[in-house]
Amino acid sequence: MSEEISSRTLSRYPLSLAGNPSRDPYFFVEYRSNLHPGVVKISDPRAMRSLLLIMDMYAASGGAASHFGGPSAFAEIVSALYAIAFSSPLGQTAGHGGGRSNREPWYEYFHIINDAGHCENIHYAVKANYGFAGLQFTDLWQFRSLNSPLTGHGECHIFPQGVLLSNGPLGSALAQSHGLALADAYQKKWNRVTITLASDGALMEGEAREVLASIPGFAQKGYLAPYLLIISDNNTKLSGRIDQDSFSMQPTFGALEVLGWKVVKVDRGHDLHYCYQAIYEAIQQALNNPREPVVLWCKTVKGFGHKASVDSVTGGHGFSLKSADQVWSVISEIYQADPIPKEFEVWCDELKRKENQGKSASYSSGNTIAFWKKLPSSKVQDGISKALIRAKKGGIPVLNITSDLPGSTGVLGFRKEFPGSSFDVGVAEANMVSAAAGCSKLGLVPVVDTFAQFGVTKGALPLIMASLSQSPVIAIFSHIGFQDAADGASHQSLNYLGMTLGIPHLEVWSLSCAVEAEKRVLLAIEEFWKLRQMGQVPPSYVFFLGRENFPIHYGNEQELASLSLRDPLICYRPHSTLKVLICAMGTLIPQALEAAHILDEKQIGAMVIHPGFLTRPQFSWWKGLLEQTKGRIVFMEDHQKIGGFSQNWTCQFLEQSIGLVPKYLGVQGEFGRSAYQAADLYDYFGLSYQHVVETVQNLVAEE
């Protein structure tokens, strides 16, 4: 097949996106632009922000995290952009008018890519306002729930009608959008514009910085179809103001013109008509000269429309409202003195009724744990800062290098007590690990932290190079497995052990509770420092932990007091005769405990063990117990079965001629998805205590 024929064939590759919406936006403002004839109806940003509030409140009522600040900053930009894509004459060969049914699908002329994944809900709101892909307003109320395609971040495997490229980890969709424009140019489709929306924090990422150079570089050589980048610049990341916590991004944006971008400053990022004009003209410029990609540098305010969000240090990154009454109050603030559409009063009343009835729109798995919830609970993270502070006060030169998430990973307490030993590189996980390795080389004890999904992906090569450079680090990677339930697949690290267990000179732990976290992390820092003092190179130490609340401790006080760095922790000893071991990752210990309690009532003795140290089993510790159970063991991990610790350990046990009769509970080659709470996903993916009970019963019956 010739190259010309191949290109022509490729150009017909079907997209799964929904076609043109069948109606105008329901909540709209009219605008007569001097750039084209006729009046255009644009989604009313006030209504879009109000929809954000209601959908976020439904998610919060189900126990999910959500976002308001970033999406609110994009409201005018996104409203204007979809009005142009769905209604304007740009790119439409038939010209303006002629009816929607006579127009070619909008996606023949536009790729609209959202890199700011935490802002996906403003896209959902605008799409529902058009009835796009069949979305109704009430569909928004299921946002982030297990039974909804409207996941926490945009996911094309869940909502292919509305999402072309999945997003979540900042910079990833931006980098992939380069390929869309490259493919269009290769197939000589010069009348389609790739439009990517990105946050200022995203442009701190390494892959984002690479593509900021490669897009204009390729365009200058004629390798790219028209390209437009829209940046929401509000100087705010998840944990605070970018220039205060890390460094100013203004020089980066100022350098874009030097790299080859046509830079257009939009100082009025919340003026709807101004945004419409700016985006329309930018698209025209990109179409007229594909060799010069265009960037709209939009000044926005995170949390715009809600003063409390605007005034907060994070710009209201998450969702701070606690009740339906507050939702109506903020909607009133958004509309100021203007009348509020009656629909919002009806929706808020319904929200209040559900709140008063103690109901929510959540998916309920029935996975209600009774046994362990009687125990006092806390975040595992509470033990992290305690360990770091104790080590620092003990004279060990600990310092923390974070990448924007210290409040989520457990290091914030240390940073408050030792601000001079704490640094934030911004949204840049690879930079974080590499900088820490450099500090390690000169004798410091650097601790890095982020979500596991980002640490083991963007930080993978830097971790390898840290080992290769004999510059070890200590890493705290939180939100493992399904613990980041509401954020969806892009944030759910299901390969974290497969990405780390094979790295030479690196050791891996799971943490189950705050007491264990404090104990093991402190022991690791002390061992790290002791080896250094002896002139030896310690390994890197990587600790994985969850997000939700867990019992403060497991096991008895004597066992906890004598817990070593690498020995497993017995979390439950059965009252009936021991017949099986349940070896579970720290996040799944509550599920295992509930199962063991139920099994005890059925006279099936199951001992629950948290392995803790995952790099290799402590064979002498395990051998006697496995002899008692005749090798019967159930492994549990919120991780892919392939590459997980259970697969790894089974091989190591067999190499030591220790026989096993194993069963494995893990993820079977699937991506995750959004849910309000991790328990919903444990049930969905076969990791709940009910599945453990069934598995153990079957295993024992096989005897």
Image (cartoon, grey):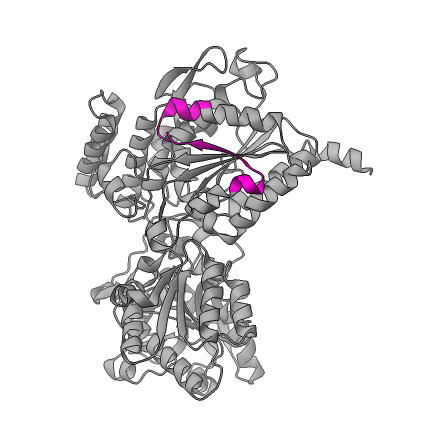
Residue 327 percent across, percent down from the top left:
22, 35
Q: Residue at x 52, y 65 (%)?
A: 462
Q: Residue at x 23, y 31 (%)?
A: 348
Q: Is residue 275 magenta?
A: yes
State the residue in front, 261 or 160: 261
Measured along the vertical axis of the image, is residue 251 above or below residue 375? above
Q: Left or right: where does residue 362 sit relative to residue 14?
A: left
State the residue in front, 135 or 504: 504
Measured along the vertical axis of the image, is residue 496 above or below residue 625? above
Q: Which image quadrant is residue 69 in?
A: top left
State the residue in front, 254 or 593: 254
Q: Residue at x 62, y 37 (%)?
A: 181
Residue 57 percent across, percent down from the top left:
27, 40
Which region shows up in magenta? Answer: 256-277
State the residue in front, 508 or 33: 33
Residue 588 percent across, percent down from the top left:
37, 65
Q: Left or right: where does residue 73 sit relative to residue 193?
A: left
Q: Residue at x 60, y 40 (%)?
A: 216
Residue 296 percent across, percent down from the top left:
47, 33
